[in-house]
């Protein structure tokens, strides 16, 4: 029996050392035409092809994590995963994503052709990386994925203390990402109570994504990527506010303005996007696109936050995932 599914697309940071070679291993030769077309786009723009990057003998942080390379690898891996979903097994009822995953979601929904999407993804990676500021991630949950009010309050106080310099960037399951000036991010990193010897973690190579510090990148993108690049979606899209874009009546000018305006300069609520997907579309499965499984934890935490089918903590989610009724499937694994 066919199951319903929501496609979920990963953002920045999905392609790391463990993912090296994953595109070639998973998608060649079956997706040779798609990968070749994406390679051609890159080569025409004077950039290393996805195939060449993916097939390097070893992972080079300076090469593979360069914004325009990392974004291209993440988009190619995710979109190729999407094309492997068996329509006889799953009825796709909606598409969403996290941060840069919105761009992949637009391609999966048919708003952008794959080659145009590759150009846009690469261009936006460069524009946003050139902006000022930094980003950090911090957990606002306990070990069982339930809210930690003390940590939430500490974050709120920092946002007020550094207003105009520190901003909420992404709500990401049981984590928040903060963006801001270098000074504000460093101050926040020192002020927040350490957790698990890992957090707060300043994310290397990240500018102040999803914040007003992206204004110049947003204005440039709005001028370059006009609404002529947009088509009516073939599938419902859930954006970073939890707003649903239902085909076939989408205002393409509004979609373009959101994509290169609000989506770039305001915070992205991944948790709300997942909550809306669950409550409005009630899917049997959430299909997480690759590379890897970067979305797994935050997605599980979002299910717990929504008390989806009585999931109230981490143990509940892990137990459900081990059963035949596992709600989350990571296609990149």
Image: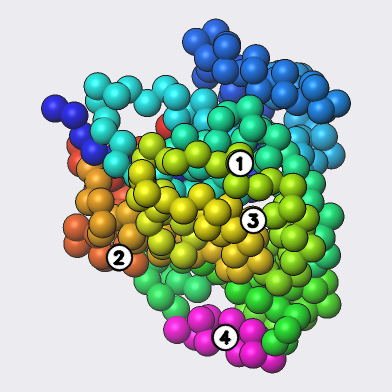
Q: Which residue is mark 2?
A: 306
Give residue 101's position: percent from left, percent from top.
55, 46
Instruction: Report crowding for label 3: few under 14, some 14 to 19, many 20 or more residues within 10 A (C-alpha).
Output: many
How far is disc 3 from disc 2 in space, using C-alphas? 29 Å
Looking at marks 1 and 4 on the same chain, the residue that comes earlier in the sequence is marked by 4
Residue 99 position, x and y percent, is 57, 54
Judge depth for marks 4 and 3 and give the one in front.
3
> Circle 3 — which element?
helix
Q: Is residue 157 magenta?
A: yes
Q: Residue furthest left?
A: 1
Which is more N-terminal, label 2 or label 3? 3
Label 2's element?
loop
Q: What residue would you read off at disc 3?
A: 260
Contact? badges 1 and 3 (CB < 8 Å): no
Mark 4 burial class by Cα count in 10 Å: few <14, some 14-19, many 20+: few
Residue at 52% over, 58% down: 254
Which corner quadrant of the image does residue 40 belong to? Answer: top right
Q: Position of residue 122 (x, y in %)?
A: 73, 39
Residue at the top extreme, as displayed = 29
Which residue range is magenta in the image? 149-161
> Mark number for residue 228?
1
For the residues bearing labels 1 and 4, Cβ distance under 8 angstroms: no
């Amino acid at each position: 029996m066919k199951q319903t599914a929501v496609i979920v697309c990963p953002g920045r940071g999905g392609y790391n050392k463990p993912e090296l070679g994953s595109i070639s291993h998973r998608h060649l030769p079956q997706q040779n035409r798609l990968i070749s077309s994406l390679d051609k786009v890159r080569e025409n723009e004077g950039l290393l092809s996805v195939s060449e990057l993916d097939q390097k003998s070893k992972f080079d942080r300076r090469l593979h994590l360069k914004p325009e390379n990392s974004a291209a690898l993440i988009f190619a891996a995710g979109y190729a995963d999407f094309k492997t979903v068996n329509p006889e097994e799953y009825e796709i009822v909606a598409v969403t994503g996290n941060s840069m995953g919105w761009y992949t979601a637009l391609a999966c929904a048919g708003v952008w052709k794959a080659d145009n999407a590759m150009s846009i993804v690469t261009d936006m990676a460069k524009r946003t990386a050139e902006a000022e500021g930094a980003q950090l991630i911090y957990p606002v949950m306990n070990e069982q994925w339930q809210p930690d009010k003390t940590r939430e309050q500490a974050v709120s106080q920092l946002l007020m203390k550094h207003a105009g310099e520190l901003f909420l960037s992404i709500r990401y399951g049981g984590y928040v990402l903060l963006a801001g000036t270098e000074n504000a991010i460093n101050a926040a990193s020192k002020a927040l109570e350490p957790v698990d010897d890992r957090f707060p973690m300043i994310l290397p190579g990240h500018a102040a994504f999803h914040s007003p510090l992206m204004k110049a990148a947003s204005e440039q993108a709005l001028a370059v990527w006009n609404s002529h690049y947009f088509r009516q979606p073939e599938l419902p899209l859930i954006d970073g506010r939890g707003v649903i874009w239902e085909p076939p009546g989408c205002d393409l000018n509004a979609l373009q303005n959101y994509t290169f305006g609000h989506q770039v300069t305001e915070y992205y609520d991944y948790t709300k996007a997942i909550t809306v997907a669950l409550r409005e579309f009630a899917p049997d499965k959430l299909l997480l696109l690759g590379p890897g499984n970067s979305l797994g934890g935050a997605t599980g935490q979002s299910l717990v936050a929504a008390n989806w089918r009585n999931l109230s903590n981490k143990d509940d989610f892990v137990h459900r995932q081990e059963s035949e009724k596992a709600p989350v499937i990571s296609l990149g694994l």
